[in-house]
Image: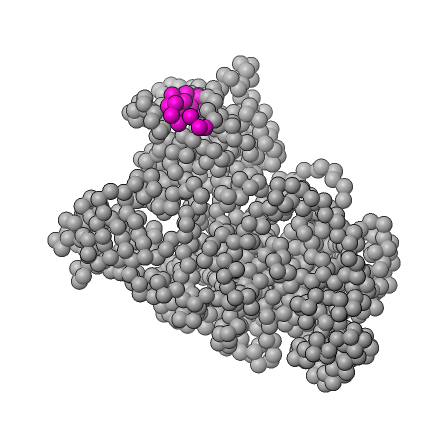
Amino acid sequence: MGMEGEELTEQETALYDRQIRVWGADAQRRLSKSHVFVGGMKGAVAEFCKNIVLAGVGSLTLADDRPVNEEALWANFLITPDESVYAGKSVAEVCCDSLKEFNPMVHVTIEKGNISSFDEEYFNKFDIIVISCCSLETKNLINEKCRGLLKRVGFYIVDCKGSCGEIFVDLKTYTYSKKTEGETLECQLRYPSYEEAVAVPWKRLPRRMSKLYFALRVIEKFEQAEGRNPGETSEVDLPGVLKLRKELCGAHDVAESFVPESLLARLVTDTREFPPVCAILGGILGQEVIKAISGKGDPVKNFFLFDVMDGKGKVEDVSPFK
Amino acid sequence: MVSQKEVSAMKGTKVLMVGAGGIGCELLKTLALSGFEDIHIIDMDTIEVSNLNRQFLFRKSHVGQSKAKVARDAVLRFKPNISITPYHANVKDNTFDVDFYKQFNVVLNGLDNLDARRHVNRLCLAADVPLIESGTTGFLGQVTVHVKGKTECYECQPKTAPKSYPVCTITSTPSKFVHCIVWAKELLFAKLYGDKNQDNDLNVRSGGASGSSDHVEDVFERKADEDIEQYGRRIYDHVFGYNIEIALENKETWKNRTRPRPIYVRDVLPDQLSQPQPNGHVDGSECAVGDLSSVSAMSSLSLKNPQDIWSLMENTKVFLEAFKLFFTKRQEDIGNLVFDKDDQLAVEFVTAAANIRASSFGIPLHSLFEAKGIAGNIIHAVATTNAIIAGLIVIEAMKVLQNDEKNYRTTYCLEHPTQNMLLMPVEPSEPNKACYVCSESPLLLEINTNRTKLGDFVEKIVKAKLGMNLPIIMHGSVLLYEAGDDLDDDMVAIYTANLEKVLSQFPTPITSGSMLTVEDMQQEFTCKINIKHREEFDEEKEPDGMVLSGWTQAPPPKESNPSNGENKANTSLSEPLNADSDDEVEVYVPEPVAKKRKHSDITKETEEEEEDELVVLPDANLDFKKKKLV
């Protein structure tokens, strides 16, 4: 992220006054030169997009070819439920129109096509890639494409499942300055890929690790094994999920009670996004992306997990490296 | 949590939101998406440009319109079949009485000032409606649940008083930039452009022997036929040169301090440059009435970037140019100006004056952008934190509606993970048995009953400390005072006379052992005050001349004078807490968090400024270490 030292315009200074007071003019300049891509426009991503458009990124590209229907309206305030407005348009197109209004200084566009078919060269145009509601294969595929690029492209996965939510962060090798008691320390973080992270043996993870992490891995594996789209589960799947839990816990050499049944039952049944959790995930993710672009502040490494049940928003480091 | 049963439970409920600002916009959206169908929203504010970076329901074309109404229309676009009732009104209006509150199942606050928060707290207690409180600043935020009899009320824990500074620090011995800002804004600016009848400590100099007030009063008046440029330079030389020389005469003051340097225009501006050189931007016909940005010393002097730190010479030029512009282009405002952060010329003048004073006292200079933030009490605000807090409010609201008492939580939103958490829930505290608001504990007032007038008691205690809006004061069964619009002229005359009476001179004297009952009918809030006579008070530490106890006030911020800050009766050197009405203030964040924030690498403030942050950070009573983590 080169600094051309261009000054913010008077218009930008007036609009962004309150946030420049939080992160500084330098960070604001970097934000305005950054390019963000999002794939999968559901509630949590809509929240994220609102936050970074307001923050003033340079451009935002949306990909989601689903047609607008009842299902797509849920938890997504970027879609006006008026058929005369959305008829014939994709979710990305409708959201794009709404987002443009939030901040005329941000260039919001859409991209058509299946995101898993986009090549490395395509992703190279961006500084940040966010995906949501993707299969395990797609997550790994896009993550690897980003990691294969010479420049660092921040890669994020965000998903809200009922009253639970998760964010995954991969910043490859990330260097930032951290100010502690009077001195500035150069910090370097080494992030694993998604594939590497979820392969870490459960036994090696801290005992107080959020149970939600394991439960989400079971559900993810189940969807993959059954060839389901993310969130395509219901109560009737619980026996199958519990069977898979047994296998996974066996493979990881932990007791089955390691992944509570009640939590799995909630995750298979409550699949619709819960709007307050979308707001929380979109807020945390927005902050993380702003940190990564500005190079200021400790970024999350590498999972953020939230469950309404205990109200904790936890950061967990799941890494095969020391 | 999100079962169909619970979602349908939201349908029958009626919620009141107070505030349609940063948190309010996010909250209204999240409530609507979550299935709430009957939402009422009160906000007296109109939309400003600086709101648009986070109050996402508003557009540039809405600037100047009611926040409550525009927010309603915007949310109805994506949720057309719900009912949103907006009130473009002050939450303290009489129409919002206890009966009004009783119609709601829960009240959600997204407010920006202590006064309104206290007012809503009392009404919620009186109406027995649960209240969910919230606040954010920068990346920090919190949500608390207040249910009468179950959890503490908003006022159970003392709130730190607004930051204020001892008079002599401001007038004679500034050591931080904020002291220079307060001097420039509250004293110099007020003296030159404000109400001439207001008391002003500008010429109060500690031990200044020659400071006879008769002499100095005249200095600020423009002499007959005095050229405006000359007048400006004379004021400059007086406040930055002569006054400093006088102050230096008091050797005692400077024994352990760095001596300030007197600054005169002639030292800063070499002769050929001492005439301002407007570059054509200033033109008599240019000033549109009511447009505060149209007259600017920066544009006359071709200074573009508000983030630049001006040199002493530039500050001097801005000072003289802004001074001249006030007297030539803003003449009709002079005599009734109050500092306003949106008044460009006022911000320029205050920045320049504060910097010149800072230069004199060896304090680092600051940019206009920074000075504006300090002078305008601008609270840092970003959309992300507000969105997160709004999500947490809705989660707590749902628990409250289901009477899920054991799961109520106070949640802190942190900038850096603490115990691996960015969102940290703690169990709410129980009601404070000694709280003068939600319990009936009497207060104790030490006061000189032989000298203090009832009027002082009303202003300094009843209004400033107890936060009452329309008080009634009784001594036994005798009504001493009552406020309100619906009083007879006879009564008004009696009350006005009573305000002038000294406490011990009432027919039934008020003295040690007396008990006064103070009541606010609108807030349905009563409290009893035991009076104790005391002869002497420390002028510097107890400038009100009275001390209220029984409810523990938070420890004063370092170097400040707690009572002074609450003295609204005349010119005070305090920073009004609600100066910036479009932002949320007062976040109470646990101690370790506040410490961490000091070393934050996100905010670009220095530690010195951090201490002067108006947002209340450390609060011993909310220290989560003492609480059971859930």
Q: Residue furthest left?
A: B507
Q: Quadrant of the C terminus of chain B?
A: bottom right
Q: Position of residue B599 (x, y in %)?
A: 60, 46
Examine the rendered structure and indicate whether residue B407 appears above or below residue A57.
below
Q: Position of residue B336 (x, y in %)?
A: 38, 37
Examine the rendered structure and indicate whether residue B598 appears above or below residue B239.
below
Q: Is residue B297 visible?
A: yes
Residue pictured at 60% horizontal, 30% vertical: B303
Residue pictured at 19% horizontal, 57% vertical: B514
- On the image, which quarter does residue A159 sit in? bottom right
Q: Is residue B47 visible?
A: no
Q: Quadrant of the N terminus of chain B?
A: bottom right
Q: In the figure, is residue B281 to the left or right of B209?
A: right
Structure colour scheme = one colour
Q: Assign the magenta stretch its main secondary structure.
A: helix
Residue pictured at 67% horizontal, 56% vertical: A286
Which region of the structure is painted magenta? B237-257
Q: Is residue B181 magenta?
A: no
Q: Position of residue B44 (x, y in %)?
A: 45, 56
Q: In the figure, is residue B119 to the left or right of A52?
A: left
| B578 or B154, nearer to the observer | B154
Residue pictured at 41% horizontal, 37% vertical: B186
Q: Is residue B241 magenta?
A: yes
Q: Position of residue B399 (x, y in %)?
A: 52, 73
